[in-house]
Image: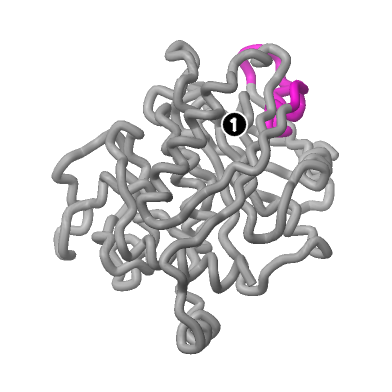
Amino acid sequence: MRFSTLLLSSSLLGLSIAHISSSSGRDFTLPSRRGCLVSDDGSIAPLITRQTRRQQNSTFPSSITVPVNFHIASTEADANLITESIASAQFSVLYDNFAAHNINLILNSTTRVIDNLTGSAFFVNEAPEGEYNYVYYREELDAYYRQTRRGGYDALNIYFFSQYLPGLTGYCQFPTLTPLTESDDEFWTDSCQINALTMPGIPAEVANPEWNLGHIAVHEAGHWFGLNHTFAGGCGATGDFVADTPAQRWEVYGCPVGEDTCPDAVGEDPIRNFMGYTDDSCTSEFTKGQEERMFHQYLTYRRQ
């Protein structure tokens, strides 16, 4: 099924605004900023009741092991773009940064497909050259997920697409209050989407100029483990529901050392944090509080 999408941007690296309409009359609007597609309107709170009950009745282990499945989709023109060494380097970036927080990722499988529709993340610009009219093939995407997703609700499935919506870098599902099973449609779409041009080792002439060290996959996996953006909640008291990430009013780009968008709150903007929007060359850390939240969210809502 085709959903018509009008992309209002002439720059592949500028702000992207997409409006998607379907024959059912439902409308969807993609974020108007560069970067991650995960919305902050639905930032997940601690889900206190169930989490507190489990914490009272059990002790979380000192480490967790999480199965990972890579799915690499390329267009025919990009058939040789994502090499084995690039995929291996991407997993190493994921492994090292989560292992530092006692989350051990195990790569169970890597699958590949070369197909123009799949490699374009099921978004295809069907307008004449120089114009933009992206069409979203949602039913085909859902079928692809059903055919390829591996493991249970506690398995991290990451899809890398050689072509992605201009200006955007990825998307990942948060955990749900009630763990999903194969009988739930949402189970099959529980995954991360990554713009493959953010992977480490992609040739410089086509790589994303800001995010090209593989940290986007770390960022999106952080959402899958239950982390919000560092700027979720702005300067409010709850913020991103992690106590040791300083408040941040909005997303910041580049690597603005000393940036402080919440001057009345303690600490400068956490520009080094993986869950912000600063350049890959700037990001390098999760906090202890984020580590604890990932453990709690994963063991409470994903692994039963």
Residue for point 51% across, 88% down: 57
Res. 97 image quadrant: top left
Q: Position of residue 7 (x, y in %)?
A: 60, 31
Instruction: Write down the quadrant of residue 102 in the picture.
Output: bottom left
The residue carrying pointer 1 sits among few (fewer than 14), some (14 to 19) or many (20 or more) residues within 10 Å by Cα, namely: many
Region of the chain picked out in magenta, as a range? 113-131
Q: In the drawing, does residue 27 fall left or right of residue 288?
A: right
Is residue 114 a member of the stretch shown in magenta?
Answer: yes
**Image height of 203 relative to 215, above or below:** above
The residue at which mark 1 appears reads as 165
261 horizontally vs 120: left or right? left
Q: Position of residue 256 (x, y in %)?
A: 21, 38
Q: Is residue 35 magenta?
A: no
Is residue 134 in sight in this rendering? no
- Three-letter amino acid code of the residue under disc 1: Leu
Q: Is residue 246 visible?
A: yes
Q: Position of residue 215 (x, y in %)?
A: 42, 38
Between 121 and 3, the residue placed more toward the observer is: 121
Residue plotted at (45% across, 11% down): 205
Asked whether 304 or 187 is in front, the reply is 304
Quadrant containing the N terminus is: top right
Element type where label 1 sits in the image: loop
Q: Quadrant of the C terminus?
A: bottom right
